[in-house]
Image: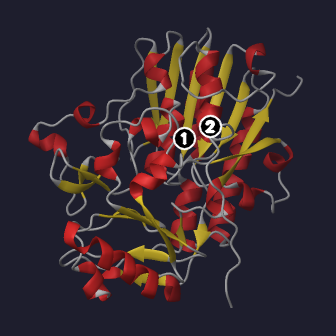
Amino acid sequence: MKTKVKYVIPDYDNSIVNLSSVVAHRFNVYSPYKPLKINSLNKYKTIIFLIADGLGYEYLKNTNSFLKAKVARVVTSVFPSSTASAITAIQNAEAPQQHALTGWFVHLKEFGAVSVPLKFSPRFGEASYENFGAKREMIFTGKSITKRMKKMSFTIYSSDIISKNKLKGRRRTLFYKKGNLNEMLKAVKKALACKGEKLIYAYTGIFDSACHHFGCRSPQALRAFQKIEKMIEKLSSEDALIIVSADHGLIDTEDAKVINLNHHENLYSMLSLPLSGDGREVYCYVKASKAAAFEEYVKKYLSHACFIYKSEELVKKGFFGRGIPNKKLFDRIGDYTLICKENYVIIDTLLNQKLKVHKGNHGGLSREEMLVPVIVIEPKSP
């Protein structure tokens, strides 16, 4: 039976970038994107901007929850609906068109390798590029809202992202033990205790992780969601405006919908680099002499599983954002982009690499992946 999937194109008048833009404008930070309207934003000195990774609207609307009741509007993710692309868009209030983080795997021409930007390491191996004297700002030039604002800010992450508190200066960071939302709650309350106007940016990845490993409809995903909701409900009596959103949602897949391009030897031989992007959208760097043959093969053998676009065409269509593209963007999106239909996933494996496919995936254009909620919670009366 075919999976019925409706597709959503990113709307850069009504996206997570526009949500981030209104937060940026609230603290006098410029964003090139039109800010969403949140009426109560200027009423409060403290804004808590909480991102629950993976919490798509299609999941939330099927819950009987406190958070569902507080949804103010629904916006789109960016393209690709990838953590690397969307979280950076939220933090910087700019789309992939500007920040040029185009997926979980990105070909970084500067290092001559397909890489994992968030880990700052090559796709094959775990050694950080920092071990070789490289700095992230050499590759990624965008700056977050918190780095650009003059008011006090707190960034709250789990210990797998940062491992050291920084409590001096305007820009402060706090970490909590990975997966421990009681510690996350304490960190937010510690930030709230500091007097003055401030932005508290907080992130949790427990729901996304549960969906990846066990599926979006799993008991583990439900428990992760309930933990997030319980924590936010405890915060709702604080004197702060709480904005909750997500970077993307997820869609479940099954083994029969996984396409390993290594098994399409004729096609794979036409590529000059391994795949980059995410399983639901992949960038293909094609040998110049094989472009026509590549298109023909995909249309003949893979049209049931994916759409094929010339990557520059997607830029012209505004998939990655608006305005002048980052000069690095075109180096990072290959010659062709394959966007998966239904709930297909496209992968490849490197030498001696084991096949690993998540149950829940994202990066594509399904409603499940692209639609995210904007939840606005004003403090409960004492």
Q: Residue at x 58, y 29 (%)?
A: 33
Instruction: Identify the mark at residue 203; answer none if there is no mark.
Output: 1
Q: Position of 293 compared to 194: left or right?
A: left
Nearer to us in this view, 359 or 365: 365
Q: Amino acid at mark 1?
A: Tyr
Task: Locate the N terminus and report the quarter of the image it occupies.
Answer: bottom right
Point out residue 367 in the picture as x, y percentages from the top left corner: 68, 61
Which element type, helix, strand or loop, lies under badge 2? Answer: strand
Disc 1 to disc 2: CB gap under 8 Å: yes
Dot placed on the residue nearer the N-terminal end, 1 or 2? 2
Q: Position of 279 compared to 203: left or right?
A: left
Which element type, helix, strand or loop, lies under badge 1? Answer: strand
Query: From what the image shows, is residue 191 above or below residue 223?
Result: above
Q: Amino acid at mark 2?
A: Leu
Point out residue 127 in the picture as x, y percentages from the top left corner: 18, 53
Q: Residue at x 30, y 41 (%)?
A: 328
